[in-house]
Structures are given as C-alpha cells and as structure tokens.
Amino acid sequence: MLLSLACNGATLYEGARLITGDGSAPIEDAAFIVSDGKFTQVGNRGALSLPADIQRVNLAGKTVIPGLIDTHTHIGYDRYSYIDSDWTRNDPTGRGFFNFGAHNFTRDNILDHLSRLAYAGIVATWSAGYEFGEVPHQIRDEVLAGQHPNAARYYSAGPGITTKQAIVPYLARQSAFGVSSEAEARAAVQRLASWNVKQIKMWPHYNPTMPMNVSLALIDEAKKYDLRVGFHPVNQSDSEAYIRAGADIYLHPIYPIDSDLVKERRPFSALTSSGYRMAFFAPYLHSPDPLLADMISPFHLKKLQGKFPSTNSEERIQSKAQWDAQVSTIRDLRANGVRFALGSDAGGAGRDKPVGWSAHVDMENMVAAGFTPNEVITAATQTSAQSLRLDDLGGIAPGKEAAFVVLDANPLDDITNTRKISQVFIRGKAIDRDGLKANWRKSWGSE
Ligand SMILES: [Zn+2]
C-alpha cells in the first residue's frame, strides 16, 4: 500500500524503476529519500545512507517519473461539468460557455483546471495568454504558498500582447493588450512585469501583422525586465527576426527556421499538436482511456467521439498532410538544436483539448514525431522546467522539489503508460486524486 505522510520526517521510497528526467537510463530497483518536500538522496536500493527512524514506502513494480510540466495551456475557460443544455449555449456575443468572455474566466475554473493538471501528473504549467486581470497572479502566489495542495503551479503570460485588430470580443484575445506603437508595446510589457509575470506572449498576428519596429520594441522591453518572450509565429522571416532580437520560445513549430540562427540561439518550442492530430488519430476516444474517462463527463466524451476523428474524409486527409509536414519540420528543428518541451495548447474555450489529459496526447504525438519515450519524458520534465526557468522542478535529484508521478506501467515500453497513474506527489505529499475524481463525478451527475 502507498502512504502519504503528513509529518516532516524523512521517507524512503524504494523498489521502483526510476526515470530521473535527464535522459539517462532508468534506475531499476531504485531508492530515493524525501524530506521537507524535497528529494535528498537518489540512487540504487541499498546504496543510500538512511537517517534513523525513516519511514519506508515500497514501490516495487511501479515506475516513478518526475512531475510533468505543460509549457503551453490556456487555463480558466473550459468547464468540465458540461451538461446537454450548456452545449448549445454558444452565442459568440453573449453569455455562452464556449467563448473567451471574461464571464467564463473565473477563479473556480482556474483552480479546477490546476487540480486537473495535477490529477494527470502535471505539476506546473504556463498559460499562454487570454488571462484577465490580477486573479491569475494571485492564484499563482497562493499555490506557491501551499494554499491549494491539489493544484499544479500556475504561471501565466497574463493577457498577452497583440495588435488592436487581432482582438475580437468573446472570440479571440479579448483580454490582450492591443498595441500599435512602440510606446504602447513597452507600456504593456511594463504592466506585465508589475504583475511579476516571467514570460510573456506575443501574437504578432495576421492582416495586418504587428509592425516590425513595434514587435522589436516589445522584445527589447521584455529583455530589460529579464522576461522570456514566447511568440506565435506568422511566417518564417518575421520569426527569424524575433529570435534574432532575443525572443526565446517559438510557440508553434510551423515554419522552418534558418539553421545557423537556431544553432546559435537554441529557442524552445513545443508540439502543441494534441488538438489537430485528433482529426485523424484518436483511438483513446473510442476505447476511452481510463484517465480521460476519469476527467470528462460521459456526455463530453460522447461529443468528442462524434467529432473525432473527423467523419469528413477531406478534413482527415488534410490534417494528416499537415501533420506529416509538421513532423518533417520538427525533425529539422530538432536536428539544429531547438529545445522541445511539452506543450499541449490544452484548454481555451473549445472543449476539444481537455486540460491535463491533452498533455498525454502530446507525449504520444512526440513519439509519432520521432522522439524516443525517454526523450519525451526528458522534454516533458527537464527541458520544460528549463523553458519556464523552474530550477527546482523537472527532475528527480537531490535539492529538487519532490514532485513526482508513480505509474503502474513503464512508459519506456509504451509512452501511453504515462496515463496509468497510481499517485501524484507535489512537495512530497500525495495529492487527493480520489477526492478530485469523486467531485467531478458528482458535478456531472454520475454519482
Ligand atoms: Zn495556445
């Protein structure tokens, strides 16, 4: 039996296969010690020096991986207690559930999403824009202070920065700062810095694209505050100009990038493929994966089953062609040194990419794009932590936070085994997965 221990004494976890997140071979029959919410020793069973009165937890037969980090989500909009009548409430100018209006971005929703991430083994996320006001930053600080023990850490880009024309009330970027001059771009960055945002989001966007001098002023201002800049690419040459100016994170790997520039700057990226690959590949919907079935209502699941894979063969063929093109771009970007992290683009207002679950889909897609399972786990832990500059997460090593996932099966055999979650630990304590699941079932009337 697994125990979660409330006391501050040291605990020895022994017997598991341990994947540390740094790409090395797994440690079979491993042992690690957790004390005061941190890893203090990690190694082979029998090789650690044990403090007196240590508590022991036997993890024989399990595999332990570091807590996962989803570097690209859109938290706070989707509701997972959907009922039939909600589904038709999609008035783009009104109070519908499926739009980016402020009425959908609530504290309760944000906290629910953070607990969904944690349930799925994700211990931190960066939400890439769409946030309203100061609530997200308050919740970020509350989670860091330990006030929400079942929640993943929540970092966000705040509202994001885009052009005035790219703000479409209720539908897109409603909360964003719309800028058309260098002064406005700098002022928006300063506002974000005042909220202690560490990484910002730039949507240069289409028709018209943000003037290059405005984009470059934005990046320049961000660098003054030591903020990382994630940008939505709109074409190759502009993307290259942003990276040359110091932008750090290439949010969707759509375009090839000059290989010398990539080799020099080594930007981060993520696949964010969990949504569109579903149009032709979604076996987990039709023999529902147990983790997914835990997290969305039977009604919601039925809606997704009806939609994916697309019944429109044209759309399926197109999606497959887009995916294949993307895979070849990803291979080139990787070969040149782009640092791929885990990013699902989950959430938003579309209900197709459930928060928490979608990260596991992206990990499966990474294998389909040529990563080995161990490379995927490194991307989803060590590289993702580096991308968000979270030095105390992203691995199982002395000094790091004891944020880890206990799996019932080995993800090196099959990456979809990351879904077979036995327990999730944050700060050395098991989160209450049974309680979360029971509440969700109640919310959709299953119990
Ligand atoms: Zn996104």
Image: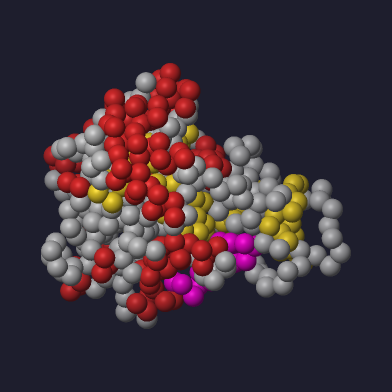
Question: What colouring method underlies this structural image?
Answer: secondary structure
Q: Is residue 1 above or below residue 445?
A: above
In the rendered image, the quadrant that contains the N terminus is bottom right
- The location of residue 190, given as percent across then percent down, is 40, 49
Q: Can the viewer see residue 413?
A: no
Judge by depth and name the residue closer to the eye, 171 or 319. Answer: 171
- The location of residue 83, given as percent across then percent down, is 24, 73
Residue at horizontal 61 percent and vertical 39 percent from the top: 22
Magenta-colored span: 423-437
Residue 53 painted magenta: no
In the rendered image, the quadrant that contains the C terminus is bottom left
- The location of residue 372, given as percent across then percent down, is 50, 35
Q: Is residue 90 above or below residue 284?
A: below
Residue at horizontal 28 percent and vertical 51 percent from the top: 177
Q: Can the viewer see residue 217?
A: yes
Which residue is outermost to the top? Answer: 260
Residue at horizontal 64 percent and vertical 55 percent from the top: 401
Q: Is residue 22 above or below residue 400?
A: above
Judge by depth and name the residue closer to the eye, 180 or 145. Answer: 180
Residue at horizontal 35 percent and vertical 63 percent from the top: 133
Label total for image = 0
- The location of residue 264, given as percent across then percent down, is 48, 23
